[in-house]
Image (cartoon, grey):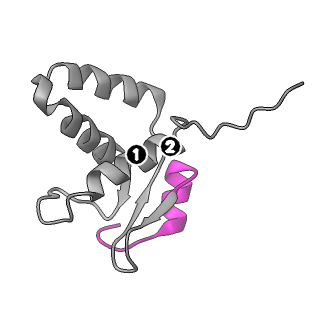
Amino acid sequence: MGDELDIEALKTKHGKIFKVSFTPDDVFYVRRLKRAEHRRIDKLTEEQPQEERGDFAMLKIVETTLLWPKKDNWDDDPSGYVPMLSNKVLELSGFTQNILTEPV
């Protein structure tokens, strides 16, 4: 796939995918985080120094679920991209308060 975006190939491989746009030029494609991945990230995060756990977990969530573009380094990107992408992935993965409930 290289740097070329092939949405159909991503859908075939990962199922549902999601487009997250910060600006028209800063667009990312992600997938949901799986339970086993979340548990692995939690375990790895616990091994980190307390003061680094938040950043570590957010970065691992993004690294795990980011489909396109592939990124090895976020240092030159706006500082909010990793936390916001991580939050969006968690929301898409069921970590949300916006769950439909209704009396029966």
Where in the figure is residue 27, as x and y percent of width and height? 38, 70
Q: Quadrant of the N terminus?
A: bottom left
User: Judging from the image, what secondary structure is the residue with disc 1 in?
Assistant: helix
Label 2 close to label 1 by CB (< 8 Å): yes
Q: What residue type is labelled 1?
A: Asn
Check residue 19 for magenta coloring: no
Question: Measuring 54% from the left and 37% from the top, which residue is drawn there?
Answer: 96
**Left or right, residue 61 beside residue 54:** right
Where in the figure is residue 100, as x and y percent of width and height? 72, 38
In the drawing, what numbered circle is on residue 70? none
Where in the figure is residue 79, as x and y percent of width and height? 20, 58
The residue carrying pointer 1 sits among few (fewer than 14), some (14 to 19) or many (20 or more) residues within 10 Å by Cα, namely some
Which residue is the site of mark 2? 91
In the drawing, what numbered circle is on residue 87? 1
Where in the figure is residue 101, as x and y percent of width and height? 75, 32
Q: Quadrant of the C terminus?
A: top right
Furthest-front residue in this view: 103
Q: State whether residue 5 is above or below residue 39.
A: below
Check residue 8 for magenta coloring: yes
**Left or right, residue 97 beside residue 36:** right
**Left or right, residue 79 beside residue 9:** left
Looking at the rendering, the stretch of residues picked out in magenta corresponds to 1-17
Question: Measuring 44% from the left and 46% from the top, which residue is drawn there?
Answer: 89
Q: Which amino acid does label 2 sit on?
A: Glu
